[in-house]
Amino acid sequence: MPTKTILVTGSSGLIGSEAVEHFDRQGHEVHGIDNNMRAVFFGDQGDTTWNLERLRRLTKNFTHHNLDIRDRIALETLFHSHSFDLIIHCAAQPSHDKARDIPILDFEVNALGTVNLLEATRLHCPKAVFVFLSTNKVYGDAPNEVPLRELETRWEYQRPEDYNGIDENCRIDRSLHSLFGASKASADLMAQEYGRYFGMNVGIFRGGCLTGPSHSGVELHGFLSYLVKVAVTGGTYSVFGYKAKQVRDNIHSHDVVRAIEEFAANPRPGEVYNLGGSRKNSISVLEAIAKAEQLTGRKMNWKYVEQNRIGDHICYISDLTKFKSHYPNWKITIDLDEIFRQILADQCLRSNDVRREPSQAGHT
Ligand SMILES: NC(=O)c1ccc[n+]([C@@H]2O[C@H](COP(=O)([O-])OP(=O)(O)OC[C@H]3O[C@@H](n4cnc5c(N)ncnc54)[C@H](O)[C@@H]3O)[C@@H](O)[C@H]2O)c1
């Protein structure tokens, strides 16, 4: 695409930083908003400063803004002084469980912060493409109603028609979401409305497990990143319920950003897409522990807690049929083995306190 001015929120986080790198590499002018609130949510382990420093070293045309998306006046000033062609909104309180302790903050960041950005876009650059990173938690625990059968290491869909997983027709209300799922559902609906009601180029991506080496993984958020971190650095990994056979589908941040790029080139106002690793990149917790042990050559310490996380999915696989049919140029390019390999390499470097340089960046 011709040179664009791109705004990425949550630019020091997993998806945001991948988007910054990707579009900077293509020669675009990239602005990032991030106030390191991940460290406020999760403490030092969630601190994203290392990733911002990495971006500063790597990029050519990236400007970081230490702003809070809850601050409408600051956003107003930013949108007044730049004309954005593409807004990639990744800033969030991202944890299902954390939201219980901070319901107001969670809602302000996830719901209100999103409306602040949508409205600033409508007022200042209504023709821009706006991509919102939503979540499969907007479905609450409705996906758990799909009949399952128990296999030796994982839960599996029972009926052949469910083989590809959950599609966008799954209902989003009358289910148990967690406060996080509900605040993201509010934002998801508002984003749809700016697409449908105002006709703006808004796309909504409901993520499965988004992953990659740029995650500042913590127990409360970042499944594979945190699991591999424990495998490398020691400590004990806790598994909550479902016999440790719960299934997640994992998509590398590079493939997420490629999906955003495809949408941005040919936007469909108000569309909603499920976006995850699909069946191909699905793995259960038991299987992930076994893989981490095999890769590190060491036994991992983990303990089983009987009580599952409230509203947690038992088996969630994203059905990508809709996105692939609208954007046939896109496909998953990074498989589970490569995801593990990259996260492991990165965790080994980080545990030696050596920061990742471009050759190990999260793309192939
Ligand atoms: N990682 C996943 O597994 C996953 C799954 C489904 C959906 N999502 C969604 O994708 C998006 C990106 O997720 P991620 O994994 O990159 O998260 P992340 O936590 O790695 O990145 C989010 C970034 O936003 C920043 N931030 C938070 N609140 C802010 C605020 N008020 N103002 C400015 N910056 C703020 C944080 O400091 C952090 O760097 C989020 O919306 C998340 O809900 C993620």
Image (tube, helix red, strand yellow):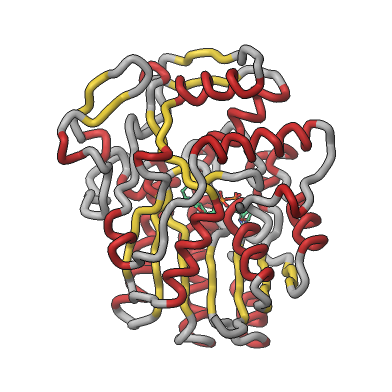
Q: Nearer the viewer, residue 50 or 358?
A: 358
- How far across and down, in percent of the image, does residue 16 sit? 61, 59
121 sits to left or right of 301: left
Query: Vertical placement of 280 versus 58: above or below?
Result: above
Query: Vertical placement of 360 versus 149: above or below?
Result: below
Residue at image position (23%, 49%) is 170
Residue at image position (53%, 23%) is 291
- How far across and down, in percent of the image, does residue 235 sit? 68, 18
Q: Quadrant of residue 241?
A: top left
Residue 183 visible in the snapshot: no
Quadrant of the frame with the N terminus: bottom right
Residue at image position (62%, 64%) is 22
Residue 22 visible in the snapshot: yes
How many numbered dots are placed on residues in this image?
0
354 sits to left or right of 172: right
29 sits to left or right of 147: right
Query: Vertical placement of 304 versus 223: above or below?
Result: above
- How far across and down, in percent of the image, does residue 49 sit? 77, 51
Q: Nearer the viewer, residue 157 or 138?
A: 157
Query: Vertical placement of 13 versus 71: above or below?
Result: above
- How far across and down, in percent of the image, does residue 134 sit? 43, 56
Residue at image position (60%, 87%) is 83
308 sits to left or right of 124: left
